[in-house]
Image (tube, rainbow, N blue to C red):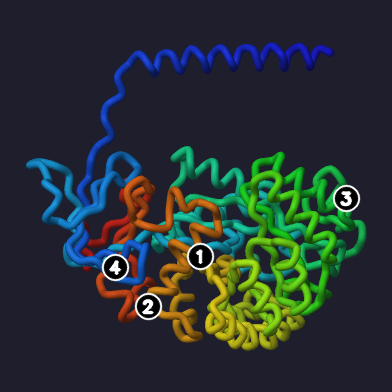
Amino acid sequence: MHRLCLSVFTAFFVVHAFTAGQALAQTSASPAPPTVYVKAGHLFDATSDQLRENVVLVVEGERIAKVAPAGEVAIPAGAKVVDLSNYWVLPGLIDCHTHLEVRADQYDPINEVRFTPFQGGFNGVVNANRTLQAGFTSVRDVGSQPFFAVDLRNAIDSGFIPGPRVVASGPPISITGGHGDMNGFAPAVHNMMYPDEKDFQIADGPDEVRRVVREQVKYGVDVIKILATGGVLSAGDKPGAEQFTYDELKIAADEAHRAGRKIAAHAHGTQGIKDAVRAGIDSIEHGSLIDAEGIALMKEHGTYLVADIYNDDYILNNAPAFGLPKEMVDKERTVGRLQRENFAKAVAAGVKIAFGTDAGVYPHGDNAKQFHYMVKFGMTPAGAIRAATSSAADLIDRSKDVGTLEAGKYADLIAVTANPLDKVEVLEHVSFVMKGGKIYKDELAAGKL
Ligand SMILES: [Zn+2]
C-alpha cells in the first residue's frame, strides 16, 4: 500500500515538473541551429549507383537541409565550411548484424560464467566508438544479454558516449538446447544463469514465444531476433538443423509486427530459412545453406539476406587461439565456404541484400572488410555500398532518417581518399566521419594524410 501511494505521488510530481520545463523552453528563444556547408568533390548519395561531382550539402543542426550543385549554393562569408573537395563522400555506413557486447578475443564458452555483465558494458563502450570511427554511423545490434543494446542505444543517443545509432534487439530468442541456450554445462549452472524471472530468451511453443516477444518489447527493443536453426559458435547443435517450428516462427513474426517491430531470423539451415521466409520474417541472417527454392521464396516475399561472408577468414585464422572449441571450428570450416557460394547464387537471382557482418565474432571496426567479399561474390561496388546504406536503412526501418544523403536526413556522412566504385576496399580506411552534423573523425583536417 505504502509503495503504491509513493509511486502515484512520484508520477504526479514528474508530470508537473515536465510541464513546467516545457513552458520554460517555449518562452526562451532557442538559437537557430548552426549551418555547416560540406563541399563534396565526388558524392555517392546512395539514391542511385552514380557519382555526382562538385556538390554542396547544407547541414543545419543534425540534419541535411539541402544537397545541390556547388554553383547553386551561395556560401556566406565567414560560414563554417567542411572542405571535402578532393574526396569521395558517402552516407554513413550501416551494419545490420553486430554484437557490440562481444570481444573477438574471448571465444571460450566458459566466459559465460566467468564474467559479470559489467564486462559486456565495458566492451560496448569501446566497440561502439571503434565502429563509429570506422565510418559505421548506424548498426542493428542483434543479440546480447538483457538489455545491453537498449541501454547502449540510450547512452549513445543522450550524448554520453560516442557510437553509432543503435537499432537494439534483446537476447536472441532460442529453443531449449538451441543456438541461444547455454549448452554443455551442468543443469545447476544453467539454472543459476537463467532463473525464470530473468529468462527473456528461451521459449518453447507458440505461447512462450509470444510472451518472450512481448517481454522484449516491454523492455524497449527496436527489433526481434529469433534463432530459426542451429548455429556455428554454439555447442551441441547443428547449423543445418531446424529449431523453431513454422508455427512458432509465425507467432514471433506476427507478434513483432503487431508491436511495430521488424524481426530477424538467424538461419543457416535450408528448411529453417524457408520456414522463416514463409512466416513473414524480415531478414534471414547468415543464409548459409539456402537452396534454389529458398532463394525463390526470398525474392517472392521481398525478404532481405544479411550474409556475414567476411568473418570466416578471421574465425579460422584466429579463433582457435582465443579458445574456440574444435567442434565449432569444424562447423565453421564446413559452413563458411558454402555460405559464400550460396550468397553468390542469391545475388545473381536478385535477392535483396543488406550489409551485416556479425561484428564481435571478428574485431569491431573491421566491418568494412566485408565489402571485398561482397564484390568478389557477385555484387558491383555500388550495389555493395547500397547494401550498407539505402538498403540497410530500409531493412532497419530508418529510411526517413539515414541511408542516403538527401534533404531531411540526418547529416551522417563519411569521406574516403579514392573512388570506392573503382576499389571498394578504400572503405576499410575512412578518413572523415560526421554523425548528426557532428564531426567524430577528421584525418583530413588533422593533416594525417
Ligand atoms: Zn550474430
Q: Amino acid at mark 4?
A: Val
From the image, state whether disc 4 or disc 1 is nearer to you: 4
Residue that carries the numbered disc 4 in the rendered image:
416
Image quadrant containing the C terminus: bottom left
Residue that carries the numbered disc 3 in the rendered image:
207
Give SS at disc 3: helix
Disc 2 to disc 1, how far (Cα)? 17 Å
Q: Residue 292's x, y, as percent?
A: 67, 84
Query: Which class describes the residues within 10 Å of circle 4: few (<14), some (14-19), or many (20+)?
Result: many
Q: Are marks 4 and 3 in contact (CB under 8 Å)?
A: no
Give SS at disc 1: loop
Say whether disc 4 or disc 1 marks the residue closer to the N-terminus: 1
Identify the image quadrant of residue 4: top right
Residue that carries the numbered disc 2 in the rendered image:
425
Q: Considering only vertical position in the picture, is 81 above or below 271?
A: above
Q: Amino acid at mark 2?
A: Glu
Q: Amino acid at mark 3?
A: Asp
Q: Residue 109's x, y, as percent?
A: 74, 68
Residue behind label 3 places its C-beta within 8 angstroms of ligand 1? no
Residue that carries the numbered disc 1 in the rendered image:
364
The residue at 79%/48% (across/down) is 212
The residue at 48%/50% (across/down) is 165
Disc 2 to disc 3, how far (Cα)? 47 Å
Image quadrant containing the N terminus: top right
Q: Amino acid at mark 1?
A: His
Residue 104 visible in the snapshot: no
Q: Quadrant of ligand 1?
A: bottom right
Say whether disc 2 or disc 1 marks the residue closer to the N-terminus: 1
- Is 433 positioned to the left or the right of 283 in the image? left
